Image: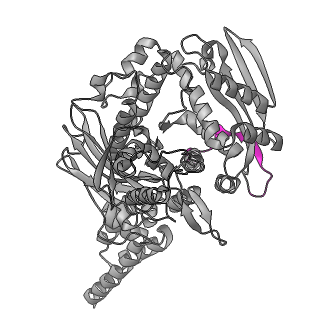
């Protein structure tokens, strides 16, 4: 996945001006996770792009839902053009162009062949005539014409008042050149997953993801997709407080052990000790949405993985309580029944969607109609935890609190904000193993200490790595992209200039450009000046006091007092070093006066 460009049609989108092409670097490296770093001062509009991308992919997603009216799909108020690269394989390519291939070769082959077998596991084209070799060669030439470093160039145009139109571009080619319109299997032209996270209260970023939950809930509520799990084709995921628990549990149980151990090491966690899943079966088995066979089977699988489970009545509700005392056998059971971390997370995510039962239908319907500028979360109900359809609770972990003492068992909730944020950001990239994912991450390092900020990009790459050499260096990463906003020069120093975008706002509108300097490996001091307009290396209060001290010098005694204060009260800095130079000049002038 790699974003190339975007243009807004119609009205401006917040501080992003319409009818202007915003272009991005889209070179790819097999050994480096594709990362776009949006940096700049507060209020410079960095997050507006994350919100725009979220709105665009949300819009493309709801266009595939039967519950969304055609008037909404052809919105007169929202238009865009977006281009990006997607990972390509022959099976996906055949699905996209199968009908066109028949047309292209009809005259050449006439009725002398047919396609006998096509499968993703063992892609073959079997022909029933002597033209087999020639036809296969032509197909591979056609396929090769669409490949640019194993990526497919996708273009989506959504004019005002019309539905999105999809096309793919041939980089070069014998038969097909330029863009070719695609009318079938459109879902193959979308990122496999779009995952968003914000460390603050950026409600506008979360809006489309929450709305999509309501759309999927409505699809099941209207019994249009009752045989399909709610989250099975879910493409957009928003990470919030609740998903943090799901990500942690799913990764500890099922993610790649080497990478999980890195997370544990950073967080100083020995292991997951125990956790509980509580399901309100009164709400879960309501007739509003029938529990489909797949979900029912997954609930049985959870029971089989549990150390113990019980159905009991608490107050007015019947509860299913599953307790997990995590050991080797429990992990083996989860591996057998759920295979990987994302499969388990997806089940948790689906069960969490059922908590929308607790929102009145009138409110749910209203949520589907709110404008994109409306603060969606203000209207979302916050039900009593004991009434939730699904919750993960009582997560116990073994953590090294003090280096010289044995680890202690504590609640996962007791971790710091920075530790929770580190798990959520890194754990999500670790868990999302599917190629073609797009991560939209708003200030992922807000609660990080400087040491963690310095390793953010390195850790993201390691979590996305698919091959390492004998020394542990990354040789290959997943074809995914992370777009993140930051105020940290450490993050910028681990990114090449072409992937860093310095944001400014002029007359209320956003502008960005690549820095004028090389950013990769550049010192923090230089980046503070170049990106954040911060020439000093110390804080404002200390800087002000240093200047006042200099202004107070009138005699040699004053000078000696200032020097003494500098040596006893102030730490080392470039400003302190420069000040000593000024003090030498002042001393020379005072010596001359006294003579």
Residue 435 percent coordinates (x, y)? 51, 50
Task: Answer above or below: position of 595 versus 255.
Answer: below
Residue 37 percent coordinates (x, y)? 39, 57
Tally the marks: 0
Residue 450 percent coordinates (x, y)? 52, 60
Task: Answer above or below: position of 33 versus 560.
Answer: above
Residue 264 is one of the magenta-drawn residues = no
Q: Which residues are magenta?
A: 403-418
- Residue at 30% of width from left, 31% of height from top? 373
For the C terminus, the image quarter is bottom left
**In the image shown, does 78 or 495 lie closer to the viewer?**
78
Name the image quarter holding residue 137.
bottom left
**In the image shown, does 108 or 117 lie closer to the viewer?**
108
Task: Answer above or below: position of 296 versus 589.
Answer: above
In this view, the residue farthest toward the left is 507
- Residue at 32% of width from left, 21% of height from top? 69
**Direction from residue 8 to residue 195 in the image, left or right:** right
Residue 138 percent coordinates (x, y)? 41, 58
Visible residue check, residue 263: yes
Visible residue check, residue 534: no
In this view, the residue farthest toward the top is 316
- Residue at 55% of width from left, 51% of height from top? 124
How is the model colour-coded?
one colour
**In the image shown, does 278 or 89 lie closer to the viewer?**
89
- Residue at 47% of width from left, 27% of height from top? 213
Residue 416 is one of the magenta-drawn residues = yes
Task: Answer above or below: position of 277 versus 408.
Answer: above
């Amino acid at each position: 996945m790699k974003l190339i460009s975007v243009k807004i049609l119609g009205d401006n989108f917040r501080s992003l001006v319409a009818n202007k092409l915003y272009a991005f670097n889209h070179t790819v490296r097999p050994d480096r996770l594709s990362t776009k770093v949006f940096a700049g001062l507060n209020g410079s509009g960095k997050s507006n792009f994350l919100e725009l991308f979220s709105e665009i992919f949300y819009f493309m997603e709801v266009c595939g839902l039967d519950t969304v009216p055609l008037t909404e799909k052809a919105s007169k108020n929202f238009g865009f053009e977006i281009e990006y690269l997607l990972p390509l394989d022959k099976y996906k390519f055949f699905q996209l162009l199968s009908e066109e291939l028949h047309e292209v070769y009809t005259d050449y082959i006439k009725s002398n062949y047919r396609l006998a077998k096509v499968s993703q596991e063992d892609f073959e084209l079997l022909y029933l005539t002597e033209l087999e070799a020639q036809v296969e060669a032509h197909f591979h030439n056609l396929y090769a014409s669409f490949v640019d470093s194993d990526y497919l160039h996708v273009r989506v145009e959504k004019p005002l008042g019309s539905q999105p139109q999809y096309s793919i571009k041939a980089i070069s080619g014998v038969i097909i050149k330029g863009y070719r319109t695609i009318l079938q299997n459109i879902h193959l032209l979308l990122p496999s997953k779009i995952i968003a996270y914000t460390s603050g209260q950026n409600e506008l970023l979360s809006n489309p993801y929450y709305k999509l939950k309501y759309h999927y809930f409505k699809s099941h509520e209207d019994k249009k997709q009752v045989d399909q799990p709610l989250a099975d084709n879910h493409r957009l995921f928003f990470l919030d407080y609740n998903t943090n628990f799901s990500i942690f549990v799913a990764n500890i149980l099922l993610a790649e052990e080497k990478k999980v151990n890195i997370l544990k090491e950073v967080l100083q966690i020995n292991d997951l000790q125990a956790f509980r899943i509580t399901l309100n079966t009164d709400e879960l088995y309501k007739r509003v949405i029938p529990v489909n066979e797949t979900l029912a089977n997954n609930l049985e699988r959870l029971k089989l993985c549990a150390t113990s489970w019980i159905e009991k009545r608490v107050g007015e509700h019947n509860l299913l309580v599953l307790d997990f005392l995590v050991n080797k056998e429990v992990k083996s059971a989860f591996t057998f029944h759920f295979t990987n971390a994302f499969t388990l997370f997806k089940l948790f995510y689906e069960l969490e969607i059922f908590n929308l039962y607790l929102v009145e239908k009138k409110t749910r319907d209203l949520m589907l109609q709110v404008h994109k500028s409306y603060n969606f979360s203000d209207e979302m109900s916050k039900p009593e935890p004991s009434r939730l359809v699904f919750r993960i609770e009582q997560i116990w972990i073994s953590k090294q609190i003090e280096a010289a003492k044995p680890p202690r068992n504590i609640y996962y909730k007791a971790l710091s904000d920075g530790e929770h944020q580190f798990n959520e950001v890194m754990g999500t990239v670790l868990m999302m193993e599917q190629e073609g994912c797009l991560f939209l991450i708003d200030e992922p390092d807000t609660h990080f200490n400087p040491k963690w900020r310095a390793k953010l990009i390195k850790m993201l790459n390691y979590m996305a790595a698919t091959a390492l050499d004998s020394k542990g260096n990354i040789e290959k990463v997943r074809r995914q992209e992370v777009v993140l906003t930051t105020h940290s020069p450490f993050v910028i120093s681990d990114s090449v200039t072409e992937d860093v975008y310095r944001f400014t706002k002029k007359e209320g509108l956003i502008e960005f450009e690549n820095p004028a300097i090389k950013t990769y490996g550049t010192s923090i001091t230089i980046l503070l000046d170049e990106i954040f307009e911060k020439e000093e290396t110390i804080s404002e209060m200390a800087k002000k006091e240093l200047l006042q001290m200099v202004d107070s010098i009138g005699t040699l005694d004053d000078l000696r007092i200032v020097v003494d204060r500098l040596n006893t009260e102030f730490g080392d800095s470039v400003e302190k070093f420069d000040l000593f130079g000024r003090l030498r000049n002042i001393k020379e002038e005072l010596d001359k006066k006294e003579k």
